[in-house]
Amino acid sequence: MPRENRSQQADERTEEERERDREERARRRAAEAVRPPIPVVNPQTPSAPWEEPVSSDTAAPPVDPPRTPRSPRRRSRRSGWARGGAVLALLAAGAVVWLLVNVLHNRSQPKPIPVPVAVKVLIPEGETRLQIAQIAASDGLTGSYHAASRRSALLNPAHYGAPPNTPDLEGFLFPATYEMNPGANVSQLVDEQLIAFRQRFGASEIRRAHELGVTPYELLTVASMIEREAQTSHDRPLIAAVIYNRLHLGMPLGIDATIYYAVELQQNIATYTGELTEAQLHIDSPYNTRTHTGLPPTPISNPGLASIEAAAHPAHVSYLYYVAAADGCGEQAFSTSESAFERNVAAYRAAVQANGGHPPTCKRK
């Protein structure tokens, strides 16, 4: 439309129309005055991806009321519980680590094997193989001692002058106290005894046997008889002298201990405790030194060091006889003549009869 026409129409508007326009503009200004301002967004700062753009025609969202700040006491209490829980957690973790270290240490360290308590096997002087076998069995050793003591690679009786047909190791089984493991085999005990014998019966004893005109094996046999006959240390070298004196004269030894040994072998028993009968005094055995001259074929016991020393160093006396003394104190009554010997025998028998048939009781203080 030409500009002059629009001006003409504007001039033609009535005063009433102009008044309505003024009222409309005033109403719009009043409405805009009560409307909340539209937030201005910085064009350089991008909006969050979830925020919708705000239009001038859309009312602004309601504003959340301000939050009431937490009480300082409640916050302190909660932080204290948190610190306590952290401490407990650290303690629990430390305990777990300690247990793990303990377990790993115990696994890496082998448990010590308990050492068994040793069994002390006491072998007294003068015991025979059969008697030692009983001791070994009672102490819990295993195996047959009688079989184990027949021969050993540790000792050859022939090296000591024993006959080639020597049946066993009687005499070489040294008496002492031996510590053994529980249930050990008897062969270990035999080995220990033979080692102990070799330590105590050496070059000096062998040389001394030759000086006495006997073999080392025969000296050991003399010692075995001394061990079974002597009851006191005083009598050991005296009994040794009687044995050597009789041997030199070719007289029977007449030692009852050898007859007891013969009876035990015949009956296969460890110990015979009864009185020898007349028949037993005439038993047909090479160990009967009443009917056979010379030494018995083997030792009749396993002597200790004192008897071995006595056999190697007999007393320088001329005694040929001995019998238990009548006082019953264990010593022997020695004599050089048969008549003196018969008197000593009579005195002993009288003492036995006076004691009711029992050996006399020693009254010496």
Image (tube, grey):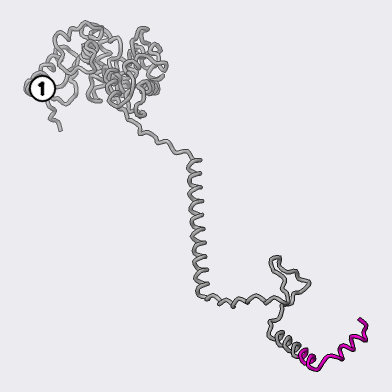
Compared to 352, does 364 lie above or below?
A: below
Residue 340 in the figure: left or right of residue 111:
left
Image spot of residue 157 (x, y percent): 38, 13
Compared to 339, does 232 lie above or below?
A: below
Image quadrant of residue 300?
top left
Image quadrant of residue 281?
top left
Compared to 153, does 28 lie above or below?
A: below
Q: Nearer the viewer, residue 222 or 12?
A: 12
Is residue 153 visible to us here?
Answer: yes
Image spot of residue 241 (x, y percent): 26, 16
Q: Nearer the viewer, residue 298 or 269?
A: 269
Q: Residue furthest toward the bottom?
A: 15
Image spot of residue 322 (x, y percent): 19, 17
Residue 73 in the figure: left or right of residue 295:
right
**Residue 6 highlighted magenta (yes or no):** yes
Q: Quadrant of the N terminus?
A: bottom right
Q: Quadrant of the C terminus?
A: top left
**Residue 219 highlighted magenta (yes or no):** no
Image spot of residue 238 (x, y percent): 25, 20
Which amino acid lies under the numbered mark 1 shown in the image of this protein?
His
How would you classify the magenta stretch by its main secondary structure?
helix
Q: Which residue is mark 1?
A: 358
Residue 121 in the figure: left or right of residue 259:
right
The kind of secondary structure element at disc 1 is loop
Magenta stretch: give its range.
Answer: 1-22
Q: Nearer the viewer, residue 35 or 271?
A: 35
Is residue 316 visible to us here?
Answer: no
Image quadrant of residue 177?
top left
Q: Residue at x 29, y 23 (%)?
A: 137
Q: Residue at x 52, y 61 (%)?
A: 86
Q: Residues within 10 Å of mark 1 (few under 14, many from 20)?
A: few
